[in-house]
Image: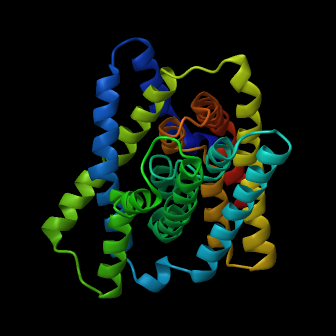
Amino acid sequence: MIDFALLCLPIFGVVALGWTATRAKLAAPVVLDALGAFSFRFALPALVFRMIAGQPLDRSFNALFFGGYLASGALIFAIVFVVSCLFAGQGIAVAGAYATTTTVSNLGFLGPPLALAFFGERSAGPLAMAILAEVMVLLTLGGIIMGSTGGSGTGAATRSLRTALNPVVVAIVFGAITAAAAIPIPAPLDRFLGFLGSAAGPTALFAVGGALAIQRIDRKAAAVAAGISAGKLVAYPLLVWCVLALVLRLESFWVQVAILLASLPSAGSNYVLAQRYAAEEDEVSAAIVLSTLVSVATVPMAAWLVQR
């Protein structure tokens, strides 16, 4: 267990550095925005494209994995949505925000460095499919639900188009096409992508830490955040394990990567959606903060459990 915690230490250490720098006013919010934009639009796509394009497609993609992972997320999404509507008395938009926050992980920023640290470059395929399942399907579904009550924001078609044009999703698609066509990456381009992609982890993690430093949790939001965090960090990975290991009986590699990815904290994009549709963004923000803080302990534990 200690070995796994030490493996995660540099990753969460950069998050802590971003938090400390922001609290000490050594990094302004505009700096965090620039780092986040650079990582999301340039460095992460370069990293993901290079990882996927550099190995055979049949080694990266598994239809059963994608179906099982998506089914697990969809079931958790449905449970949280129904419970929020029927038992917590929330409206449709708020229930959609809670369900999205429970199922859409911080795969873009935390996924690559953690997956690479524990499983190497072969994890590119599972990571790509998890991003497609959570971002293209569950995040889009959450946006449609939140916008269905007539709140401000873009329509379903526009939201779907923006999701499809997500830089990381585009990199996944082009990486898969390159791998399927067996097109070799020229050495100069490969070095460029490697150099650019190597900046993805540090910049993204620093921006995550800075974002945590400027968010606050009040008493009203704490209970909701605790429930969402429990669903995100415990129920979701457990269901992924049940579906992929017990029902589909996939190879241990696919199960292990899936559990690690499902155990990641909630993504910041959930807050952006909730804010756009006025769907209790304070509670969503609190859940993102709390799940990220708790994941410092739960992610190494999950990695240790799946690799025993």
Please tell me which residue is depicted at 59% across the width and 36% down the height of the picture: 288
- Viewed as shown, does residue 28 lie left or right of 227? left
Please tell me which residue is depicted at 63% across the width and 68% down the height of the picture: 70
Is residue 115 visible in the rendered structure shown here? yes
**The residue positioned farthest toward the right in the image shown:** 87
Residue 281 lies in what quarter of the image? top right
Identify which residue, 93 or 120, lies in the foreground.
93
Q: Where is residue 72 in the image (x, y as percent from the top left)?
A: 71, 65
Is residue 54 visible in the rendered structure shown here? no
**The residue positioned farthest toward the top in the image shown:** 24
Total of numbered circles in the picture? 0
**The residue positioned farthest toward the bottom in the image shown:** 181
Identify which residue, 162 or 106, lies in the foreground.
162
Identify which residue, 153 or 260, lies in the foreground.
153
Q: Position of residue 250 (x, y in %)?
A: 69, 79
- Viewed as shown, does residue 201 lie left or right of 273? left
Please tell me which residue is depicted at 20% across the width and 62% down the height of the picture: 191
Q: Where is residue 185 in the image (x, y as percent from the top left)?
A: 21, 75
Q: Which colour scheme is used?
A: rainbow
Please tell me which residue is depicted at 55% across the width and 66% down the height of the picture: 133
Quadrant of the snapshot with the C terminus: bottom right
Q: In this view, does 55 lie above or below 300?
A: below
- Viewed as shown, does residue 277 lie left or right of 169? right
Residue 278 lies in what quarter of the image? top right
Quadrant of the snapshot with the N terminus: top right
Q: Where is residue 170 in the image (x, y as percent from the top left)?
A: 33, 66
